[in-house]
Image (cartoon, rainbow, N blue to C red):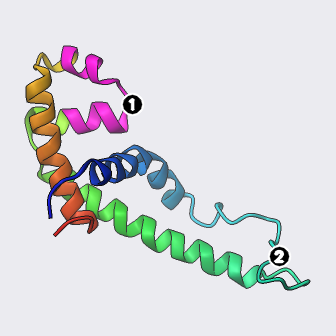
Amino acid sequence: MELTQEIIAKVENDLRRYPDWIVRLEVGGLGIPSRAIVTGGSSAPSTSSLVERDVELSDETKRKVMAIEMVYDRLHGKTKDIIDYRYFQSYNRNEVLRMLRISKRQFYYRRDMAIGSFARALGYIE
């Protein structure tokens, strides 16, 4: 499967959310809302579904965090810097180009190679 714009967008979204996921995992349990939500047309609120939903989100978050960390640790040099500056520190593309002194072509080549690795680790492509 090839790296499409849709897959790139999914990976970029995950990479941008990664710093917040780390915080969420470190403060575990604080992400469960204190209000019960009425689900399934029932008149009684279902608190178990809140806990189950939080566990599912936590498991998915842990899986994605582990995948991102494993790929990130294998990156080197400017490729690693691009991911760090662009997605973890939220610099715009032009700032990254200026800081790393690279061309747009180099930026996109390195970014796409890294995004492909993240996409495979996250299960978006084979």
The answer to whether 93 appears left or right of 71 in the picture is right
Residue drawn at 45 percent across, 74 percent down? 59
Residue occupied by mark 1: 90
Residue drawn at 89 percent across, 84 percent down? 44
Indicate whether 69 appears above or below 48: above
Could you say where residue 77 lies in the image, as x and y percent from the top left? 9, 35
The answer to whether 104 appears left or right of 56 in the picture is left
Could you say where residue 31 lies in the image, as x and y percent from the top left? 64, 61
Q: Residues within 10 Å of mark 1 (few under 14, many from 20)?
A: few
Decide whether residue 91 is among the magenta residues: yes
The answer to whether 68 appears left or right of 2 in the picture is right
Query: Is any atom of residue 3 visible in this view?
Result: yes
- Location of residue 43 by image quarter: bottom right
Look at the image and give the residue range highlighted in magenta.
82-98
The answer to whether 89 appears left or right of 36 in the picture is left
User: At numbered mark 1, what does the secondary structure look like: helix, strand or loop?
Assistant: loop
Could you say where residue 89 lies in the image, as x and y percent from the top left? 37, 32
Could you say where residue 82 lies in the image, as x and y percent from the top left? 21, 33
Decide whether residue 50 is among the magenta residues: no
Indicate whether 34 appears above or below 117: below
User: At numbered mark 2, what does the secondary structure look like: helix, strand or loop?
Assistant: loop
Q: Residues within 10 Å of mark 2 (few under 14, many from 20)?
A: few
1 and 2 marks in contact (CB < 8 Å)? no
Residue drawn at 15 percent across, 65 percent down? 1
- Residue type at mark 1 is Ser
Q: Nearer the viewer, mark 1 or mark 2?
A: 2
Query: Is any atom of residue 79 visible in this view?
Result: no
Q: CA distance from mark 1 to mark 2?
A: 37 Å
Residue occupied by mark 2: 38
- Residue type at mark 2 is Val
Q: Main secondary structure of the magenta part?
A: helix
